[in-house]
Image (cartoon, coloured by chain):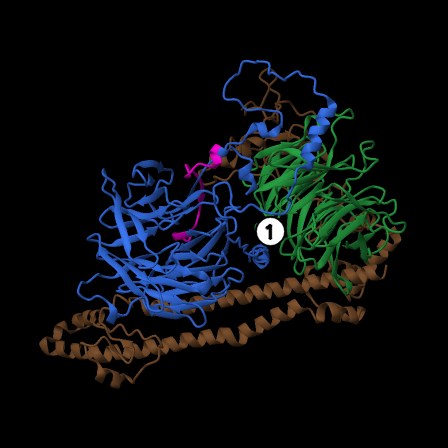
Amino acid sequence: MSLPDWCPPYSKNRSLSITGEEVFCICKKPDTGKLMVGCDGCDDWFHFTCMRIPEQYKDLVFSFYCPYCQAGVTGPASTSVEHKELPRTIWKRKCRLHNCFKECKPNSKYCCEEHGEQYMRQVLSKLRIDGMKQEQQENLVLRMAKYTKTGNVEDGFQKIGNPAFIEGEVDKSQDPELYSSLIANDERMEELRSEDHKLGTETIPNCKQAIEHLNNYLDWLNKVNSKLFAEDVVQDDINGKNRKKKSAARKKQKNAICGYNPTCKPPLTVDEFAAKYDPEKASINGTCTKLRCNKHNDWSTMLMQQYTNKLRSLQNHQERIALLLSTRKSQLHIQYYERLLRRKT
Amino acid sequence: MTNLLLQDPFAVLKEYPEKLTHTLENPLHTECLQFSPRGDYLALGCGNGGVVIYDMDTNRPILALGSKLGAHVRSVQAISWSTCGRYLLTASRDWYVKLWDLENHSQPIKEICVGSPVWTCQWIDSSRGLCVATALEEETSFLINFEGQPALTPLIDASDRDLSNNQGYVISLAVHHTLKNIVITGSSKGWVTFYRLDSVPKVIMSQKIANSNIKHVAISQTGDKLAINSSDRTIRQYSLRISGDTMTVDMKLEHKYQDVINKLQWNGIFFSSKSADYLVASTNGSSAHELYLWETTSGTLVRVLEGSEEELMDIDWNFYNMCIASNGLESGDVYIWSIIIAPKWSALAPDFEEVEENIDYQEKEDEFDQVDELEQQQELNQVEEVDIDLITNERFDVRGNDLLVPLFTIPTNYERILMMQLPKQ
Amino acid sequence: MFQLKYQLPSIAEGRGQSTSAKISPDGGLVAMVQGTVILVYKIDDTGFAEFRMVVTSHSRSISDVCWSPDGKCVATASDDFTVEITHLSYGLIHRLVGHTAPVVSLCFNAKGNLLFSSSMDESIKIWDVLNGSQLRTIAAHSESVVSIDVPQCDGSVLSSGSYDGLIRIFDTSSGHCLKTLTYDKDWKSETGVVPISQVKFSANSKYLLVKSLDGVVKLWDCIRGYVVRTFKRESDDSQQLVHSCGMDFLYPQDDSPPLVVSGYETGDIYCWDSATKKLLYVLRDNERHRDHPIMSIDCKGNLMCSLSLNGECYLWDWVK
């Protein structure tokens, strides 16, 4: 941050050269009793007016940094190498009441209870619903508060502003007929619910099953491959014992059938398959037995990815439906309350 | 398009785009691209198997196919829009060709497994669900029929193949624009073969024209020009005549396009509309970043489209909005060249006139004539008696594009908007 | 003539101004503004029923409502400077903030991916419906832009009418002004510039129907740039109206020439043959709309929806 245009460049002078009187602030004037604030970065003092801060904010300063510290000319950012971040003035939260400049009490938006009440009263008085008298409006607010089914009006009133109120269940008894026509029999809700149900009970379990199915087949294939090519290892064994490990590793990499089968069902048992294996043939019962198969290269990881992607996107879709359900529900609830309120006026 | 009628006709009627105007960033890395028939959407096939559709009004992505199910899991190699603009065909290295309905694109409506990575796929007749595809290490291309249960048949059976000469694998293809039953394929050993699809597809001509891969076969809209891009660094342009009854093919070499200095291969080729007055190609190699544009009658290079700063791959040219799109090899972003129509200041005030240079004032013959008010009124009345038609639309736009080509609007996905507004957890 | 079909009730008297009522693209719903609320009625041949009450979060009254082409959303323009897009089943979709004065006119393109708004801040803004972001601002008027229209067959152009007396046509993709319609006689009229109150493209986008605040309706050939028809009441020319009264084309389903339907401050609705300029019918009823300005006229097929400032809303059938 650079210096604001109303602030003169930094000057080291801290006293008047003639009198030696101590001077402060950006205006470099002695203390005349005008309201000042101390900078937490450079220990100099600054006039509220020079800083262009209204004096009523005096109780709201939490930690103040002068323009020079904020620009990094002085203060923590100028001296420390690690402290690269420029400091900022931090304010305490002001009471919500327009002309009160006191800080809020902990966990409150007001400086005191009276101001809280005063604020709400102001809000109510500003509420303007076309064609409604002040009194009627206040009644309306009272009624709304009642819909929250909370013991006293104040708690109920607080609850209205809470998203949980509109997302939760509505009070059917207020107008059962409206409830059943508007909310209970909403077509879109039904559609969403049945889609959600189908996903949870059918589509997603099916997909998980397909993954299991493929895993079983890959297991089988692994067994076939180790059965078919384990013999090579045995042969190596005869040739030289100490080369066994290396050679086995190499063989395993090199010798494996492609194993692609469109159905992903083991066509035969491992032993039967191994017995039928013939390096000259390209496939046995629909299972590709080529050793280095360019065409089906990568088929198993690809298929697995297909299934896992499918599962993931189905789960995303399920989340999406949950969101739509809740949006639709809140929308219906809003409609319900709007109608309740309007009907009785 | 009413806006074209109100703009400078000289700018509107330019025959090819001139300037890079937009870059569409695509973090999923574009592998192939195609405009919708009317040019209002652009579909991008991506490296991870995604297919993303951009709205050309806003230049922003509006949807990805298969948000619920069935997105591809390997790089998408080809995209083909149906003539009605509603259906999309995608072919991928994950062995699948999928058919999508843009009315409801959360999952494919149909799909078929070709059994090995698919190189390319194109509609033959989208109204009948018929398309043709080529796949890795296959000596024939495949007909796919999406009507009813999807069915895959080799374009030509092994038994009917001419085994006397090994033509290699089929790697590229084109469907004739006017004769919808003619499919042309190119092979890895430089053979170009013409098929006629009747009840049983038949070879009507086969010819070796190069010693290496036929990477692309392109055919002009009117069907009388053929361009063949081969890995021997040459694009060959032929005049083509296929007689309707006898189905004999007559092709004559017209031009060969080569990069004489750098001897580069060509990555993609595309013909301009109608009788194909221009041919555009992208160059292979990290040093070349341009699209070359030749005039096809003379064979001369007329324009180099610059601005991409990387090697370009696939090309599509849309004639309704007169722009060319091409994807960059490294970034995977898409570059779009368009024609630029400068604003007319005279449009802001009806009595302004734009002049190229100062004009000496000369009084016009009738400039200060006293026009009789009655006469003026009569003139006005005459204008008010001319017949008007408030309803009938034009058949063609000023560039000669057919406006009866259906315009399909992809429904706005409000649910996606709600999802996007969800506070991030 | 117009035959009364239904009267659509407003909620309660004095619940805010009624400024606009529009028939949905499929003709099955009517959205009617009342204060900051949109009442949606379902209509068919057997009757009508309240379908939904769309509650907006506008803090001041709505001045214009418009249907998305798919009929699933309504967009509202408000005096609180904002535009909202509300989905009939999911509620608020976007709140579009950017104008610096009351927003007065709205229009979707036929694809439904762009929303156009015009405001008393003299500008027109183009919004991306999917992302809820502003794509472009067109500032080419020197007074409130009170009416905009995009033809349903062609989203490439936008017309605007302003109190500065200019009718402009813009290219929607570049925002450039393509043409300005007004002729010297308008400019130099003794009473000064006549403010424009509404613009509406013909079905094929070649003609533009323009109503000015003196009540005169003119049909422009917007390619060539001259007036091809003028529709006037006997009393026009003399006074400037206070309200922008509604106007629309009606395309009879029996293929007879399109009609020009225009409402006035007295509550009258005039109807001319667009080809012959012949006055076909004047809707003047002692009970309906009497002495209340017609704020909005919207036609779909043979159906015409009229709304007056006091909230009376009627649906009429055009019969020969």
Image height of C269 relative to C253, above or below: above
Helix, strand or loop status at disc 1: loop
Q: Badge 1, how many Cα within 10 Å: few under 14, some, many 20+?
A: many
Output the letter for the chain in blue: B
Q: Does residue C34 appear anywhere in the picture?
A: no
Q: Is residue B20 magenta?
A: yes
In the depicted view, which residue is nearer to us: A108 or C242?
C242
- What is chain C's hue in the picture? green
Image height of C70 relative to B370, above or below: below
Q: Is residue A272 left or right of residue B372?
A: left
In the depicted view, which residue is nearer to us: A60 or B288?
B288
Write down the chain letter for disc 1: C
Toward which corner of the image does residue C294 lie, by quadrant? top right
In the depicted view, which residue is nearer to us: B18 or A14?
B18
Q: Which residues are magenta?
A: B10-33
Image height of B95 relative to C277, above or below: below
- What is chain A's hue in the picture? brown
Q: Residue B101: x, y in percent?
A: 50, 62
Q: Residue B252: x, y in percent?
A: 26, 48
Kindly identify which residue carries mark 1: C112
Q: Is residue C300 left or right of residue B124?
A: right
Q: Is residue A7 left or right of residue B115?
A: right
Image height of B114 relative to B354, above or below: below
Q: Residue B147: x, y in percent?
A: 45, 69
Q: Is residue C230 magenta?
A: no
Residue type for callout 1: Gly
Q: How many marks?
A: 1
Q: Is residue B413 left or right of residue B80?
A: right
Q: Residue A85: x, y in percent?
A: 50, 40
